[in-house]
Amino acid sequence: MDRIDGALICVFWKMAFSILVIGTYVIIASGGPREVFRGLLESPKHTLTGFVLETLTATGFTLALALTHPARALLFISLNPLWCALFGRAFLEERLPVRTLVVLFLCLVCILVVFLPEILEAEGKHGTGGHASEGASGANYTSAPSPAPTVADANATTANNNGNGGASDDGDEGAYDATMELGDAISFLTGITMAGYITTVRHASKYAPDANMPAVMICGLMGAGVISFSLAAGRVMPHAAGWNEAS
């Protein structure tokens, strides 16, 4: 769980600096703290909905980039225009032209083209017990395990599927695979929550123009900071996380 702990620490400090910088701007641009609170109370339903969605989005975006490959994370998250279009039809009563529907369909096809070969390859490895590449790379991993494997080592081990059937003695590789799957799921859900937040902002601009949605965003960043701090059990300082320990 070291990768997850590290990702939570990244979320906490990202939120801390974002709140400091963006929060200062929002307060000044809104005309002071009093105007900020007035805008938050202008439309409670938009404030609450935006707060929840922004909290999930801010947390999920950084976690996704930390837990899986950035290219994969950004690919899933970039599906948010698709969800925006669907949410706009459902909540803003927008009509979807045929060209938009065609583009949305092609987006799904592209995702399938990107991930289908990987899915089929994974299924093939599971079906053969993970020994398909043993002859090619098993000799490289029959020696005693090296101490303190890095993330790069985990990537290499996963790609080569070592002679132990794709699992190391201490289970680090299996944990890494599970972490990547978690990162993919978070990426996909983050794209949906991001689209939900964008739709909430658009809905507020139409039905509650006096609502202070930038202030809602700051509240969401605070929520993400609280969540990451809680899940990390308060171990968000570098010395508490062991970042200053000698390797």
Image (cartoon, rainbow, N blue to C red):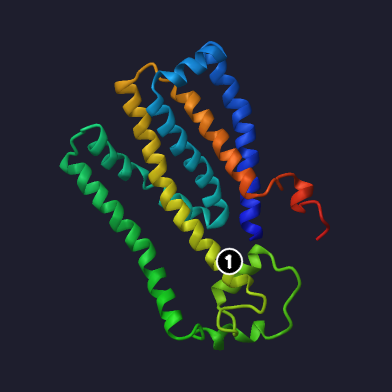
Q: Tell me the amino acid under the disc marked 1.
A: Tyr
Q: Is residue 112 left or right of residue 159?
A: left
Residue drawn at (45%, 37%) of the image: 52
Q: Residue 217 location, x and y as percent?
A: 49, 30
118 or 234: which is nearer to us? 234
Quadrant including the N terminus? bottom right
- Neighbour tally class for label 1: few under 14, some 14-19, many 20 plus, Cα within 10 Å: some
Q: Residue 45 location, x and y as percent?
A: 38, 28
How many callouts does the rendering have?
1
Q: Is residue 160 above or below residue 188?
A: below
Q: Residue 161 location, x and y as percent?
A: 55, 78
Q: Is residue 159 left or right of residue 119?
A: right
Residue drawn at (64%, 33%) of the image: 17
Instruction: Indicate the secondary structure of the residue bearing disc 1.
Output: helix
Residue drawn at (60%, 39%) of the image: 226
Quadrant including the C terminus? bottom right
Q: Residue 232 location, x and y as percent?
A: 65, 49
Q: Which residue is mark 1?
A: 176
Q: Is residue 222 above or below residue 130?
A: above
Q: Is residue 29 left or right of residue 88?
A: right
48 or 189: which is nearer to us? 48
Residue drawn at (56%, 56%) of the image: 67
Q: Is residue 64 left or right of residue 94?
A: right
235 or 21: which is nearer to us? 235
Question: Seen from this angle, which residue lies furthest top?
Answer: 31
